[in-house]
Amino acid sequence: MEDVQARVAWLREEIRKHDYQYYVLDQPLISDAEYDRLVRELLELERQHPELVTPDSPTRRVGGEPLPGFRQVRHRVPLLSLDNAFSEAEIRDFHRRVSERVEGEVSYVTELKMDGVSVALVYENGVLVSGATRGDGAVGEDVTANVRTIRSLPLRLRQELPRLEVRGEVYLAKEVFARLNQEREERGERTFANPRNAAAGSLRQLDPRVTAGRSLAVVLYDVLYAEGVTLATQQEVLEFLARVGLPVEPHYRFCPGVEEVLAFCREWQQRRHELAYDIDGVVIKLDSLPARELLGSTVKSPRWAIAYKFPAEEKVTRLLTVEANVGRTGVITPTAILEPVTLAGTVVSRASLHNFDLAREKDIRVGDLVVVHKAGDIIPEVVGPLTESRTGNESELVPPERCPVCGSQVVRFSGEVALRCDNINCPARLVESLVFFASRDAMDIEGLGPALAAQLVEKGMVRNVADLYYLSAEQLAELPRMGKKSAANLVRALEKSKARPLHRLLHALGIRHVGLKSARLLAAHFPDIDLFPGLSREQLTALPEVGEKMAESVMAFFAEPRNLETIERLKAAGVNTREPVAGGVQTGPLAGKVFVLTGTLASMTRAEAGALIESLGGKTSSSVSRRTDYVVAGTDPGSKLQVARELGVTVLGEEEFLRLTGRAGS
Ligand code: 9MJ
């Protein structure tokens, strides 16, 4: 036991060290795989010895259940906001005001101004205990569970101090912001206007699991309260923060006078686009902390600091035309084609208009002179038209009625801003649909991944998911990097997939809002695909768990003639389109039994064993708990077997499992 304790402590230290190297210093010392091994070992030990789990363990970043709301917290030290300066003259004014009150030479520290959300963090005895938003400066919201998910933020400091309160900025890197927005656009959701809004939205999620998926980052720049530490200058503050393991924005500079401050501002106004994150200015702070005391604050902001805001980068150019583009999920977005213009470091000739509603709201017309900027310093956007310079030759935007790629009727789901092409065979959507169709929870076609799907579409060999079942081994063998053997394997995998139950097929077709669970439910009530085209809204919404959205989407899917054609071709190829009723979900011999599989079975893959269990009414789970009925252990079982024994769960060998499922001897 002592050995385990020591190992756990060692693993935590190692992981903390590598987190710091990777997230804070950006200098990893080990490979991702080696790091993963450390984390997995720690997770395993903590699972076997729950009594050793501590809240500051690096495995405890994401907590459990969503919160009902945020608790309010009063900041011990108010978080003041800064006055702004918009020109060099205003910076000089600030310097003059400071110099009048402070004796001798006045020196500053300049910091890049992160465009994020201000937070206050509290560490007690070196352990992160609280994180709160700035709020109105006096009272903020408790977002501890969410700040814990920020990977660059240590849950334990490198130095144990009785109490430390720090202030910083939570932000999203430009690339993360762009990806997040792209995903939202593809799902037909509203996009965030800039990384700051995205960071604020992510930090204020009631479910920390959502926050964890947003890849937030943080830098600290102020010590609000520190027991047992004396700091005399801002430089010392930043050095101290870095020393205890907290991330600090590295480009800050000591400036002996106002001229150096101005040079720093000019330099970063030019260089801001080199950074991986958005900055909107420079914060200028008096270096001496005793001198700050002397200056004090007004009710609103300190007299010892000012935020220099960069001028917004906007350009005027002409909107030449608007293209409708079809994304991976069928969302159709308008893209402005612009007369090329240099903006924030790059030449811009296209800009997103996000959706047709928004473009219309802004009254953007083809031929307009428009103002463009970059959201989050990265995504070109049309801000709006210069209506006063219109000639009368401009034309209003017309949302397409048909998909520009395949000509299908465009649909719009209620509650969504996006227009969509709902034809699963639209070439723009086809590659992704194929990969999804073949994925494990869907038709589970081994060997059909993105690279192959792209080739099949490019070569015109597959125009819809049904075409997959008409491919011959000879045809496939002619593809680059595809030998005879893999071609034969793929054909075999396709053949095997034909027998999947209806719910897998429904899921595989990628009907919006119909996940695996809903597909099961639908198939249990309507066990033949031929029943679907005739279903009414009432019939669908009569089922528990089927809401308006899902009903609408199912009806739209089965109303599209191209989808019906695909289904006919699937049937003709011999693909099963029924749900097995005998031995169905509620009535099978394994009804209600929960299975966990571990190790390798000789007679079938784990996926096949899972399918077998499900076909007999049982359920599978990936982890062993007291609710598990059986653990099926093959050769080389993992730690699940041990857990099962500890919990007294029945363990079945392969033979026993086959007997239970009626497969023994087969
Ligand atoms: C940002 N946003 O990067 C301050 N800030 O200091 C930096 N904000 C600040 N400092 C005192 N680097 C109040 C706000």
Image: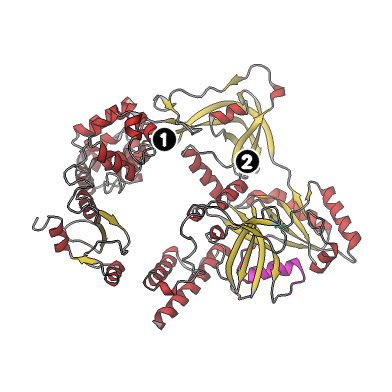
**Mark 2 or mark 1, which is nearer the start of the sequence?**
2
Looking at the image, what colour scheme do you see? secondary structure
Which of label 1 and label 2 is nearer to you? 1
For the image, the number of numbered tags is 2
- Of 574 and 430, the residue lying toward us: 574
Q: Is residue 278 magenta?
A: no
Query: Where residue 259 appears, x then y in whole percent?
Result: 83, 56
Residue 25 can be seen in this image:
no
Q: Over which residues does the magenta segment extend? A: 230-251
Residue 457 can be seen in this image:
yes
Name the quarter where the N terminus is drawn: bottom left
The residue at label 1 has a CB less than 8 Å from ligand 1: no
Residue type indicated by callout 1: Lys
The outermost residue toward the bottom is 2
Q: Label for residue 549?
A: 1
- Residue 293 as seen in the image, left or right of residue 513: right
Q: Is residue 380 above or below residue 393?
A: below
Q: Label for residue 374?
A: 2
Residue type indicated by callout 2: Lys
Local secondary structure at mark 2: strand
Name the quarter where the C terminus is drawn: bottom left
Q: Is residue 231 above or below residue 355?
A: below
The reply to whether discs 1 and 2 touch (Cβ–Cβ < 8 Å) is no
Local secondary structure at mark 1: helix
Q: How many neighbours does mark 1 have within 10 angstroms: few (below 14), some (14-19), or many (20 or more)?
A: some
Q: Is residue 248 magenta?
A: yes
- Of 153 and 545, the residue lying toward us: 545
| Residue in view at x 54 percent, y 65 percent | 27
